[in-house]
Image (tube, coloured by chain):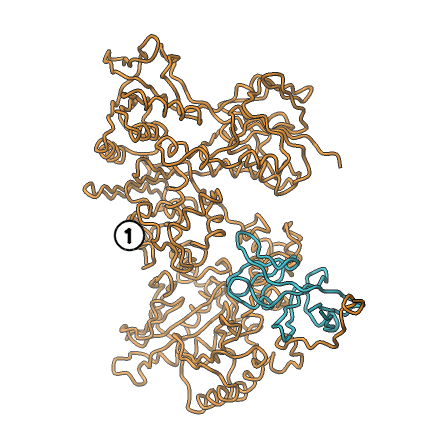
Chain colours: A orange, B cyan
Amino acid sequence: MQREKLVLVGNGMAGVRTLEELLKLMPEKFDITVFGDEPCGNYNRILLSPVLTGEKTIDQIMLNDERWYRENRITLHKGRKVTRIDRLRRQVLAEEGTAAEYDRLILALGSEPFVLPVPGAGLPGVISFRNIHDVDLMIEATRQFRNAVVIGGGLLGLEAAHGLMARGMQVTVVHLLDTLMERQLDKPAAELLRNSLELRGLKFLLGKETAAILGEKRVKGLRFKDGAEIAADLVVMAAGIRPNIALARSAGIYCERGIVVNDTMQTYDPRIYAVGECAEHRRQTYGLVAPLFEQAKVCANQLAQFGFASYKGSVTSTKLKVTGIDLFSAGNYLGDADSDELIFKDAAQGVYKKLVIANNRIKGAVLYGDTIDGTWYFQLMRDATDISAIRDNLLFGKAHVGSAGHGAAAGRIAQAPDDTEVCGCNGVCKGEIVRAITANNLFTLDQVRAHTKASASCGSCTGLVEELMASTLGSGYSETPRKKPLCACTDFNHEEVRVAIVANALKSIPEVRRFLDWRTPDGCHACRPAINYYLLCAWPDEYQDDVQSRFINERIHANIQKDGTYSVVPRIFGGITTAAQLRAIADAADKFKVPTVKITGGQRIDLLGVKKEDLPGIWGELGKAGFISGHAYGKALRTVKTCVGSEWCRFGTQDSTTMGIRLEEMSWGSWMPHKFKMAVSGCPRNCAEATIKDFGVVAVESGWELHIGGNGGVKVRATDLLCKVTTEAEVLEYCAAFLQLYREEARYLERTAPWIERIGLAYIKGRIVEDRRDRKALAERFMESQKHMQIDPWAGLTNNPDRRAFIPIKPVRMSPDEATVEA
Amino acid sequence: MTWLEIGSIEEIPRLGSRVIKTPAGDIAVFRDARDEVYALEDRCPHKGGPLSQGIVFDRRVACPLHNWIIDLESGMATGADHGCARGYPVRVIAGSVHVNI
């Protein structure tokens, strides 16, 4: 196939990222030529500040060295500025007569510093802070001169000032407004920032407008509108950046503030794409890394002619690292007439937090000094989560909202020693994460998870890992929480897949994949179990369960252990058993030489270390004594834990054991998005710990309290009180309705606790407590589904003569290798 | 080196796996959606998990213990993980599967 010609103008992060994404998709499609006006490969521009301070060298921030271009057979014209695009001949022309023809052209021109139009702006010693050349000039100046003035009290200006100060200069920051970083901070936060920067030795002149830069051969000082003057040997202009559109405009490509692109990153000339800081999409331009990378992905997808990706814009937050001061800002952080503010301020500790709330949703946030919850607030804001239930504790952070997770131990991870453990599940230390980020050029949380496993298991250290990413990657780092697709095989999320299944009567996994244009032929280990569950939930009477799409535990109805053996937990309804039952379990354990017998946390008996081949045998033995599967391995009802209740206990108010047995009899066998645990306590002393269960019942003199959404585990969450009812029939009906709502609406692998936090208690009350008809309908659907679910899988497998799923294959014959025979 | 004939391809579920016990250890035999057959030692390079019990998709298997994704053709861990499960040559003659051990 004839290769098409692709030219990239702009050898920076956005453009090269587009090429990387494209090479992943279609390495052979294009002959690629790159023009860059800087004399080197592609480096990480957001790490220029550490180069200025001397913490890093240019080599350490290179993303693509020249070898990368060679290896990917990309022609790199470095240090060549493109001067003209000839759209008729489809050519780009650069300095010194270099030219290249294109079939497709990517413009990734970045932005240029805004230079104040004042007299003297062109003097030697007046520079901007934009590329490696500027940094070299600044470092050079620090060797000879003493007084620096930075014009601009925004992020870039403060970083430049910090770097120059670190190299021994006296630095004054001049800012037009009287608030620093007014694009990200409100006044109180800006004040805290200014105080602490002043303590570190920076000087500020706020509310000063520069009128002229003084000097003849070299800059000598500045004069302000009010007539005051200040001496300076170096002036850094950091008063803002502008998308670089001159080249595009001269070629007649439509521009406003940036080069205007559509959702496929195409400009008004369909052969020409624009990505990065120079592009304007839906009236927005972006200067942060995450949006640029999202654009790169979409552009590559379009260039590869896959055509399904589109860019819808990014919601951004800024997590800033100025001089080791933690700042976070997102959304409408100033608020307006319709919003409330939640404010926490502890000036002595240097902590300030403000959340802007409207309609019980977070609209914006400013955090200073303690930013560990920034990502969480941002996620709540993005998802428009109703925060009314957690409003009281919201400002104290995620660790204080019904949880005792690891987040509370946060502190300042960036300052912690390298051997600080960040991820307790996988034993990953801070140093390892930082090394992985730098060595592999990681930019996203998912990448860090893949490389280090940190935050890849329970996720409770996600905030810490993101802190580390921000402190390692610099201030341009910003992860955009987005509509999370179900898995890498698709762009659709869980809800969209579920809706499609029901609306279009999709009844098998291949049908779902075909209908929703899955990218992979068989799906993957993440999407197949999810779709299998969604189909099972949608069509309980029709759907043919796909065993190969289930995790081994549910395929084999036992729980795989680290050594490849399995555990067997027979169901003991309500935790009430008999001597005869216990004897039968003991006999089965003896017969199959079970090495470990354990009482579980849910009041059941666990037989551990059973070989796969023995599973049908031991089930058969247990079955003879009347046992069925306890589903201790499944995303299903696990156990109903009970206390002895009024039958024996002197405090008991109701018969909790019978209630537990009724609930378990009603609910066993039902597949769910995740495991589901219940408990019934006979009085408010709550010995069955019902308030950390998915559905907990607590008996009181006058009836039953129903509690929902609790769990122990990584993040302890106490239940929310759903309501109080009086009769056993009501307990069962409310329970069935809640189970069905959870089954129908939670995402696969989402437990009730995060589900309730996501959708809000009010919604669940609305469906189950306030709407009687809805409750009855939900409960009915649950009971209908149970007709098809309450089939003991152990009995089925024991009685099936085909044991192939359990036993090894026996070879039919051995024959010598032909090669061996000939020899 | 010998060829071990393990019988009809139908003995292995599609997108699934069976185990052969050999003196050299357990070998997992996988069958993908296109009826290609692969054989790997039944040990994940990560923590020794039985790959035969994983979910098979495309030409890969997800280890049941910690979800490492192993390429069935090469035995190599994919993504950012590093490690390799030993592979064994496989041939299918007239619907019967042979593994070279």
Residue A412, relative to residue A544: is it above or below?
Answer: above
Residue A200 x, y percent position in the rendering? 23, 33
Q: Is residue A701 left or right of residue A797?
A: left
Dot 1 crowding, Cα within 10 Å, few <14, some 14–19, many 20+ = some
Q: Residue furthest front?
A: A823
Residue B85 x, y percent position in the rendering? 59, 62
Residue carrying label 1: A393
Q: Residue furthest top?
A: A216
Q: Residue at x 57, y 58 (%)?
A: B69
Chain to which mark 1 belongs: A
Residue A76, relative to residue A516: is it above or below?
Answer: above
Q: Amino acid at mark 1?
A: Asn
| Quadrant (top left/top right/bottom left/bottom right) for the N terminus of chain A | top right
**Residue A329 shows in the view:** yes
Q: Is residue A232 left or right of residue A769?
A: left
- Which secondary structure lies at badge 1? helix
